[in-house]
Image: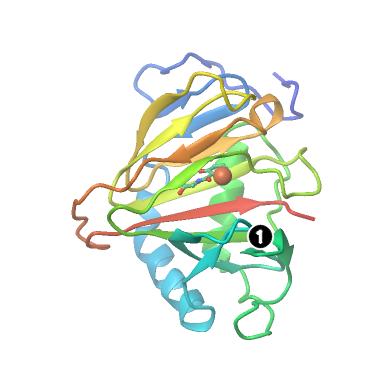
């Protein structure tokens, strides 16, 4: 069955569809529990490769604050924040070089997840790598620096679990809280594309492969 986002609706689109690992977060948004688990080793070695060329760094917000989450990027463009604002840039401001290529295992996972969520032909040109250490957080925000809100966002969680805040289209809308664990993938787009969201301060915990850290990969079509 075609759905309103140009994709295919699954037969059972219940909030928690029996026996599966799919949790709906409302129209256009879904958590695919554990989808990335089998890709852990490849993803982690690709992440190491990317950040050895474009190191994780704490960017500055336009208001002059140091972000607690350390970030890097790969792909044609990367998300950058500094005193002059937020933007996508084809070069790493630290080195002046283009961002590292997006590893194949990144793009194929992102595309598979998008299809699984009903968004066909997702071709991300940006992958933001977020590293959380204990206490790091991401305040409530919308993702709105992209040129086209027609494409969904695919977000992959690795390492220590975090609490995700998921609100509505207005900052003041009520938020739900849900855990994102190692291997979980969130896809949202269509009517959910501009919903407010954030990450609560990371708790002390330990993951066998990532120690105290959480890594999030966020794939977008920025241009
Ligand atoms: C994070 N994620 O999970 C931060 N944005 O570390 C995001 O800000 C985000 O997970 C848009 C769509 C999905 C996300
Ligand atoms: Fe976001």
Question: Which quarter of the image is occupied by the N terminus?
Answer: top right
Name which residue lies at 60% across and 81% down: 94
Q: Is residue 15 above or below residue 216?
A: above
Choose between 120 and 98: the one closer to the eye.
Answer: 98
Choose between 182 and 197: the one closer to the eye.
Answer: 197
> For this view, does 217 lie left or right of residue 215?
right
Name which residue lies at 48% across and 59% down: 67
Q: Position of residue 13 (x, y in %)?
A: 53, 16
Q: Is residue 69 above or below residue 149?
A: below
Q: Position of residue 76 (x, y in %)?
A: 71, 68
Choose between 193 and 21: the one closer to the eye.
Answer: 193
Choose between 216 and 138: the one closer to the eye.
Answer: 138
Q: Residue furthest front?
A: 64
Q: Is residue 38 above or below residue 64?
A: above
* Local SS, label 1: strand
Q: Position of residue 211 (x, y in %)?
A: 22, 62
Residue at image mark 1: 126
Choose top left, top right, bottom left or bottom right for residue 62. bottom right
Choose top left, top right, bottom left or bottom right for residue 216. bottom left
Q: Is residue 30 above or below residue 26?
A: below
> For this view, does 183 lie left or right of residue 112?
left
Mark 1 crowd level (few <14, some 14–19, many ≥20, 10 Å Cα) = many
Name which residue lies at 52% across and 46% down: 155
Question: Which quarter of the image is occupied by the C terminus?
Answer: bottom right
Name which residue lies at 20% across and 51% down: 204
The reply to whether the residue tagged 1 has its Cβ within 8 angstroms of ligand 1 is no
Label tally: 1
What colour scheme was applied to this rendering of the protein?
rainbow
> For this view, does 117 lie left or right of residue 178?
right
């Amino acid at each position: 069955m075609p759905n309103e986002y140009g994709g295919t609706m699954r037969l059972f689109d219940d909030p928690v569809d029996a026996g599966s690992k799919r949790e709906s977060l409302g129209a256009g948004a879904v958590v695919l529990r554990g989808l990335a688990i089998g890709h852990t080793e490849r993803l982690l070695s690709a992440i190491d490769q990317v950040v050895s060329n474009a190191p994780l760094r704490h960017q500055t917000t336009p208001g002059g604050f140091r972000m607690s989450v350390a970030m890097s990027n790969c792909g044609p463009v990367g998300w950058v924040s500094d005193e002059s604002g937020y933007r996508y840039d084809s070069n790493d401001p630290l080195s002046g070089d283009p961002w590292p290529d997006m590893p194949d295992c990144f793009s194929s996972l992102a595309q598979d997840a998008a299809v699984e969520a009903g968004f066909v032909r997702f071709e991300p040109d940006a992958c933001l790598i977020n590293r959380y250490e204990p206490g790091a957080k991401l305040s409530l925000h919308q993702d709105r620096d992209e040129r086209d809100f027609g494409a969904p966002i695919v977000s992959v969680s690795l390492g220590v679990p975090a609490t995700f805040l998921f609100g509505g289209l207005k900052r003041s809308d009520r938020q739900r809280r849900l855990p994102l664990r190692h291997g979980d993938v969130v896809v949202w787009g269509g009517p959910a594309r501009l919903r407010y969201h954030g990450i609560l301060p990371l708790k002390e915990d330990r993951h066998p492969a990532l120690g105290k850290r959480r890594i999030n990969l966020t794939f977008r079509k920025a241009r």
